[in-house]
Image (cartoon, grey):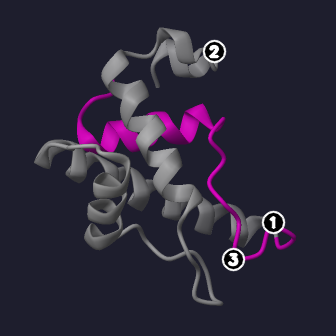
Amino acid sequence: MTEAVRKNDPESLSYAALHLWGWFIELASARGGNGFGLNPIGYADIEAWARLTCRDPTPWEVSALRRMDNAALEESAKKSATKTTNGPGRQFDPDDWEAFDRALGKVGTSG
């Protein structure tokens, strides 16, 4: 885990990580569910978001967003399994810097 994440200090994260995190929070806040849990953020969701917000993510950024989403869904499932009060519709917490660090590690940007 990076020192910046350990201290919950978003100011210490790189600009690249912060803009991806902001994009991910925008996408995650608009995600739907299926009654059993959160739906993953799909390519069509990313394409519509990019078009509607005049963003132009690179293929690497799209891949990073998808991997961040996979990590977020894994974390949500773990938390739902251990805390039954959360239920399957629990949203990913944007202040969960440790989960964010794990997500970045999965895309190879954590250091």
Is residue 93 something one can see in this rendering? yes
User: Which disc is residue 7 wearing?
Assistant: 2
Please state which of residues 111 and 42 is positioned toward the viewer in this rendering: 42
Q: Is residue 4 left or right of residue 93?
A: left
Residue kind at label 1, given as amino acid type = Lys
Q: Are marks 1 and 2 in contact (CB under 8 Å)?
A: no
Any mark on residue 39, and which? none
Residue at 40% across / 61% down in the picture? 70
Horizontal side, residue 75 vs residue 108: left or right: right
- Please give left or right for residue 20 compared with residue 6 in the image: left
Q: Where residue 106 appears, x then y in whole percent?
A: 31, 45
In the figure, 2 relative to 102: above or below? above
Give the side of residue 33 with respect to residue 52, left or right. right
Task: Identify which amino acid the numbered label 3 is placed on.
Answer: Pro
Prevailing secondary structure class for the magenta stretch in the rendered image: loop
Residue located 63% across and 88% down the image: 36
Label 3 and label 2: CA atoms lie apart by: 29 Å
Q: Nearer the viewer, residue 71 or 16?
A: 16
Provide the residue designation for mark 1. Answer: 83
Decide which of 74, 18 is in the foreground and name it.
18
State whether residue 43 is above or below residue 1: below
Question: Dot 3 corresponds to which residue?
Answer: 88
Q: Secondary structure at mark 2?
A: loop
Q: Secondary structure at mark 1?
A: loop
